[in-house]
Image (cartoon, helix red, strand yellow):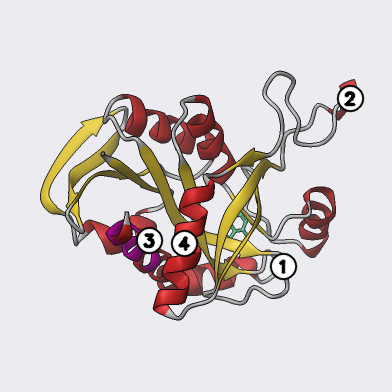
Amino acid sequence: MKIAILGAMREEIEPLLTKIENLTKHEYASNIFYTGTLCGKEIAMAYSKIGKVNAALTATLLIEKFGCQKLLFSGVAGGINEALKIGDLIFGEKLVQHDVDITAFGHPWGFIPESGDFVESDGELNELAKKVASKMGVKIIGGTIATGDQFIASEEKKEWIKNTYKADALEMEGASVGYVCKCLNVPFFVLRAISDTADMDAGFSFEEFLVSSAKVSANFLENMIDEL
Ligand code: ADE
């Protein structure tokens, strides 16, 4: 079984890229894909570049072109749930596109006809994450992740996302990747470590903690892959 490892930014996959054995580089669709083995498992890896469209494209290619049968996303997020501090881990049990707005036609925020709103991640991968966390002695929570094509740096917008979707964290790719995986019948897992709290200081905090939080997430994911 080949496993897809996906991040949005170079920093999010770099810590794992250096550990791939038998590394081969593939250029396709204006991006670079890496194949090889990690923890003895066959993998294909890429960073999609930021946003829902890039992430959906890359997830689709990892599945359809590279033949991956499970997809694991690693990266950073803005924290909403006050229990989440910088560097803390969350996995998305449910993910939603917070910027989908066809409310003019009477639909709820985030809802697309014939497509839905919340997408649920794979229960077995989520259980494995809890098991790995207790083995490593680290804290992880499962929760709702809200995804949109916006870097959120406003208390007001954050509160709106929190109230509208009961979200615990927000980022810019997870729900689109989840939707692709759901449509293609591929179990998926979205892991994030907190880099900021999506308030007016979010830009500074993101720049300060992107690399360290991305490493926390990647290191955890590696431990999960080892157990797969
Ligand atoms: N990823 C990490 N922090 C974020 C934020 N504040 N908004 C959107 N995506 C993020």
Locate residue 99, reporting x and y percent. 72, 39
Labelled disc at residue 81: 1
Foreground mark, 1 or 3, reads 3
Foreground mark, 2 or 4, reads 4
Residues marked 1 and 4 touching at CB (< 8 Å): no
- Secondary structure category for the residue under label 1: loop
User: Which residue is identified by label 3?
Assistant: 221
Q: CA distance from mark 2 to mark 3?
A: 40 Å
User: Which residue is identified by label 4?
Assistant: 129
Residue 225 is covered by the magenta coloring: yes
Q: Is mark 3 within 8 Å of ligand 1?
A: no
Q: CA distance from mark 1 to mark 3?
A: 22 Å
- In magenta, the rendered stretch is 220-226
**Quadrant where the image shows the N terminus:** top left
For the question of whether residue 152 can be seen, the reply is yes
**80 vs 104: above or below:** below
Labelled disc at residue 104: 2
For the question of whether residue 147 can be seen, the reply is no
Sequence-wise, the earlier of marks 2 and 1 is: 1
- Secondary structure category for the residue under label 2: helix
Q: Give the side of residue 20 with respect to residue 137, left or right.
A: left
Ligand 1: give its quadrant: bottom right
